[in-house]
Amino acid sequence: MSTVHLTIATRESRLALWQAHHLQDLLQELGCKVDILGMTTQGDQILDRSLSKVGGKGLFVKELEVALEEGRADLAVHSLKDVPMDMPQGFALACVMAREDPRDAWVSPHFASLQDLPQGAVVGTSSLRRTVLLRALRPDLQIEPLRGNLDTRLRKLDEGQYAGIVLAAAGLKRLGLSERIRHIFAITEMLPAAGQGALGIEIQTHREDVRTVLAPLADQTTWLAVAAERAVSRAMGGSCSMPLAAHATLHKDHLSLDAAWGNPEDLYAPLIKAHAVSDVTTLAQAEQLGLQVAAQLRAMGAA
């Protein structure tokens, strides 16, 4: 039997390369020969404007999809929260791997928690979701944009541009930077983004050979949870220009889903929150739960 030879397309940030090497190791354990194709995406190049103003999270995946289309790569690995809710024609999410910590982390050289900040302190994030959630916790703070990869964001913090910044705990943990975390926000304080902490593997729809190879790496518990989260986001218009949080947890077959939406026009308006629980064993059922929660949000005034 001949060895399966695969090439993984990835962004070249340190975190993206960690993800690609992690996937490479797992595939090599399955007996595959695996190469990595590192690429710089538009999302990595445009750092002076927020993603919501320049085309959204799809800027991080487009070049990788072109590499798949041209046959230079067989699969692409992404942080699932960077993957657009609707995949382009001809592409599919073939595998969702076990989730790392989905929560948000508080990182600051001088302040142990958000509560310790003086009034009017500057906090960095470019996520509209984090902006509305931070405002709900501390309306007095000054929230300023923060773009760039993880190392760039930490450098800007260390240069004193911000009193503190909010980052995904998963990325810090994966890169061995746990010591930078001063506080991890409870899910109830800062509801995560859809798919946060999970890795998604994208292929071309017709590549059943690759899908078969990836099957042992899929984590069904994570996949059901993120399918529900992404369904909320998709139903609400699913772009990064929307302050939306969605997080699901699975206990036995009970999937519990929470979502929160903030008003992008009035960042100080109260959050709209929704919750639902259902017995779920299939992706279709998980997505149905997501639609139910999105309908609740809209009924309460979320647009």
Image (spheres, rainbow, N blue to C red):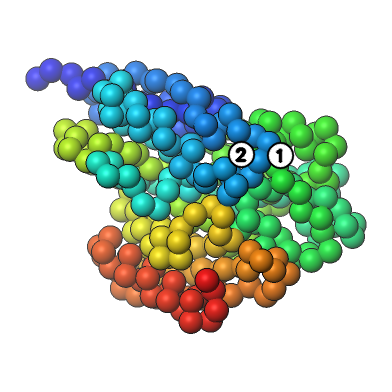
Please name whichever residue, 63 or 110, is drawn nearer the observer in this view of the structure: 63
Which residue does the numbered mark 2 point to in the structure image?
A: 172
Residue 65, compared with residue 139, is above or below; it is above
Mark 1 lies on a secondary structure that is helix
Percent x, y of residue 44: 56, 31
Q: Position of residue 257 (x, y in %)?
A: 45, 69
| Residue at (64% x, 44% y) in the render | 50
Q: Which residue is painted at 45% across and 61% down in the image? A: 237
Which residue is painted at 28% across and 36% down in the image?
Answer: 203
Instruction: Locate residue 153 relative to residue 96 in the image: left or right.
Output: right
Residue 274 at x, y = what percent?
51, 76
Q: Amino acid at mark 1?
A: Arg
Q: 287 and 302: which one is in front? A: 302
Disc 1: which residue: 180
Q: Is residue 181 left or right of residue 249?
A: right
Image position of 175 with respect to 31: above or below:
below
Give whichever of discs 1 and 2 has the lower sequence position.
2
Give the class, few, some or many, for how many residues have Cα within 10 Å of label 2's Cα (few <14, many ≥20): some
Callout 2: SS: helix
Judge whether residue 40 can be spotted in this image. Answer: yes
**What crowding class fits label 1: few (fewer than 14 Cα within 10 Å), some (14-19), or many (20 or more)?**
some
In space, the residues marked 1 and 2 are separated at their CA atoms by 8 Å
Amino acid residing under circle 2: Leu
